[in-house]
Image (cartoon, helix red, strand yellow):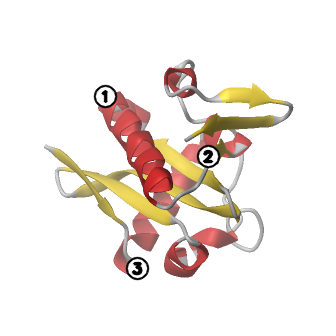
């Protein structure tokens, strides 16, 4: 059985391990001093910036994550969205995306943007199902 919950400090090592797995799949390394520095302190990087971070648990293990933070006054940006692909939890990924969109609406954001790196881990067509559109080099949906 799986469940989605708000991430906490104790999840950070699991989230970093998931990120490492995801990046290895696209021949990149985790860079906690650069592009992945947000994972050093999730509470500050996400909750401290008018955002949210969720984890997906299955059999008491963190197997997925979704994190978004304020980009500007009217836009929330999805920075992290990943579920271990070998577990057959595609619905979990869709549920995480739904929770981020619901959060954005409740926080009065007008737009949600999906960062290019996060989009690399989302199955083809999933963002389109949720009405995301390519606008130049951005992937955005109106809330």
Q: Earlier in the sequence, mark 1 or mark 2?
A: 1
* x, y percent for residue 8: 37, 75
Image point (68%, 71%), residue name = 37
Residue mark closest to the camera, 1 vs 2: 2
Q: Quadrant of the C terminus?
A: top right
Residue mark closest to the camera, 1 vs 3: 3
Residue for badge 2? 112
Is 8 on the left-hand or right-hand side of 73? left
Image point (68%, 26%), residue name = 133
Image point (37%, 68%), residue name = 7
Which numbered dot is residue 88?
A: 1
Count of number-bearing discs: 3
* x, y percent for residue 79: 62, 54
Crowding near the residue tagged with mark 1, few <14, some 14–19, many ≥20 C-alpha atoms within 10 Å: few
Please tell me whether mark 2 sits on a helix, a strand or a loop: strand
Q: Marks 3 and 2, how far apart in space? A: 25 Å
Crowding near the residue tagged with mark 3, few <14, some 14–19, many ≥20 C-alpha atoms within 10 Å: few
Q: Earlier in the sequence, mark 3 or mark 2?
A: 3
């Amino acid at each position: 059985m799986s469940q989605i919950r708000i991430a906490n400090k104790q999840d950070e090592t699991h989230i970093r391990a998931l990120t490492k797995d995801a990046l290895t799949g696209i021949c990149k390394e985790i860079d906690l001093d650069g592009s992945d520095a947000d994972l050093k302190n999730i509470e500050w990087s996400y909750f401290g910036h008018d955002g949210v971070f969720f984890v997906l648990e299955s059999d008491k293990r963190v197997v997925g994550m979704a994190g978004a933070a304020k980009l500007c006054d009217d836009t929330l940006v999805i920075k992290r969205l990943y579920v271990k692909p070998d577990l057959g939890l595609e619905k979990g990924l869709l549920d995480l995306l739904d929770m981020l969109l619901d959060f954005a609406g409740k926080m009065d954001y007008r737009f949600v943007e999906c960062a290019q790196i996060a989009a690399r881990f989302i199955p083809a067509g999933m963002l389109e199902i949720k009405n995301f559109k390519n606008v130049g080099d951005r992937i955005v949906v109106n809330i």
